[in-house]
Amino acid sequence: MTKTIVIGSGFGGIASALRMRARGDEVILVERLSQIGGRAQVFEKNGFRHDAGPTVITAPFLFDELYELFGENRADHIEFRPLDPWYRFYFHNGQQFDYAASLDDTCKNIEAFSKQDAAGYRKLLKISKDIFDVGFTKLADKPFTKFGAMMAQVPALLKLRSYLSVSSLVGRYIKHPLIRQAFSIHPLLVGGNPFSTTSIYALIHYLERKWGVYFAMGGTGALVASLRALMERHGVQIMLDTDVARITTSGNKVTGITTAEGAHITADRIICNGDPPVIYKELMEQTGRTHKKAIPEKFTKYSMGLFVMFFGTKTTYEDVAHHTIWMGPRFKELLDDIFEKKILADDFSLYLHRPTATDKSFAPDGCDSFYVLCPVPNLQGNIDWDKTGPVLRDRIVSALEETIMPNLSETITDDFWMTPQDFKNDYRSMHGAGFSIAPLFTQSAWFRYHNQDAEFDNLFFAAAGAHPGAGMPGVLCSAKVVEALVEAQEKKMKKNAA
């Protein structure tokens, strides 16, 4: 029986472990933290529950597939509840826009800002579908370990204007500045600047329309717990509190791992769910190859960092939607400060998550649970987070109190936060980046970290930094790419043996 070690238990690692187990492998899932889930950790404090990681579920069929591998039905184990609105935008001038589950409702809400843009949005959806049909259907779960595989898709990508940024593409169909912002923010959900992220990511507009936006009842943590139970039912071995110090090699093969405690575990195959640049720099011996992707490290662009603040309130805020995008007065200039200048500006934009809008179990009776995510520079910026964290916390509380959460400073309770330094320390993320390398055109497909190493052919990557990219659909598809590569490798070995 083939023995596979999966390093890291984020969604890409969990999906890889399940897919390899369904193929008949002996699978060991190794996690350095005390609970699985990678960044999808759960924090509990005085009756308040907080999902620390991703909260938006799109493309739910990718989770359904994991249960179906073993003849099970995901809905029997965890409920995905549809949300409406998907997101509520609060703009700095006090206007609000609901991005609704119904296309007609969304267009009606757009008309309150611009009747022309309602028609423009329908046109944007059409081009988004065209991009989706190539970028997701044809490319997301296909390997890009060969340059020729990407070149074969270049004509289609050029036809779809993939050389444009998301913001540029949206700007061709949406003219009102605030609605243009609303329909340009999707790259930020996977760590990209809308003004530099390839327009391939505009496919998210159609992806959401096709499958909807959901919340896992009980939270993302409940989804992780359900997937853990699925792994345990079917024989995946899970090792927690186990830090991998080194991936061992022999010739052109990886042979196993050595833990920080000095234990050695052999393997026929290793799948890494960790951040690829960290894996190569810290866990592997340096070889003659100076880099593991097309663009050298010194030219690599990383995603922004995240300041994530968790808190409860001693009252409820019924007018605050499940997902709120709180937009500050600047947009392009703020993103330039974050991604390019790497400075912490006086203003900000926020993503506010209120799970108690859908699931009351996240807080005591009469209370609400929140987390607020603030994009900030990664650790390539010179910011002392020990000093800056408390200051930014107070500024965020004041901004929310003055707008959508009156008296917040009086009702807030049990607050704490994570900074890019925590992302580096806890999640082994290069530069404390929230989403590994940025989703630029020159860092996508073959240009991204490959799902199969070119030197060690039994070393694979199912991670945000590998193809196709960050976000739950991205890393779940990454596991599918690895499965396809393993199948192709095994077929070739059997053919050669015959």
Image (tube, grey):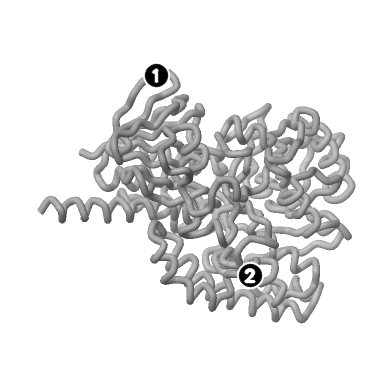
Q: CA distance from mark 1 to mark 2?
A: 49 Å
Picture residue at 42% right of the left edge, 29% below the top: 246
Local secondary structure at mark 1:
loop
Viewer can see residue 318: no
Disc on the earlier residue, 1 or 2: 2
Three-letter amino acid code of the residue under disc 2: Leu
Name the mark on residue 464: none
The residue located at (41%, 62%) in the rendering is 147
Left or right position of 332 against 222: right
Q: Are marks 1 and 2 in contact (CB under 8 Å)?
A: no
Which residue is situated farthest in the front direction here? 288
> Where does the C terminus fall, quadrant-wise?
bottom left
Instruction: Name the secondary structure under disc 2.
Output: loop
Q: What type is the residue that disc 1 sits on?
A: Gly
Q: Badge 2, how many Cα within 10 Å: few under 14, some, many 20+?
A: some
**Residue 406, quarter of the rendered image:** top right
Which of the numbered marks, if any, corresponds to residue 262? 1
Vertical position of residue 270 compared to residue 110: above or below: above
Please provide percent x and percent y for residue 248.
35, 31
Q: Position of residue 417 (x, y in %)?
A: 71, 33
User: Residue 19 or 344: which is nearer the viewer?
Assistant: 344
Q: Residue 128, percent across and down? A: 58, 72
Please tell me whether residue 262 is drawn above or below residue 197 in the rendered image: above
Seen in the image, is 175 located left or right of residue 218? right
> From where the camera sits, is residue 13 visible?
yes
Q: Residue at x 60, y 67 (%)?
A: 199
Quarter occupied by the N terminus = top left
Is disc 1 surrounded by few (<14), some (14 to 19) or many (20+) residues within 10 Å? few
Residue beneath label 2, please? 164
User: Please, is residue 59 above or below residue 407 in the view?
Assistant: below
Total marks placed: 2
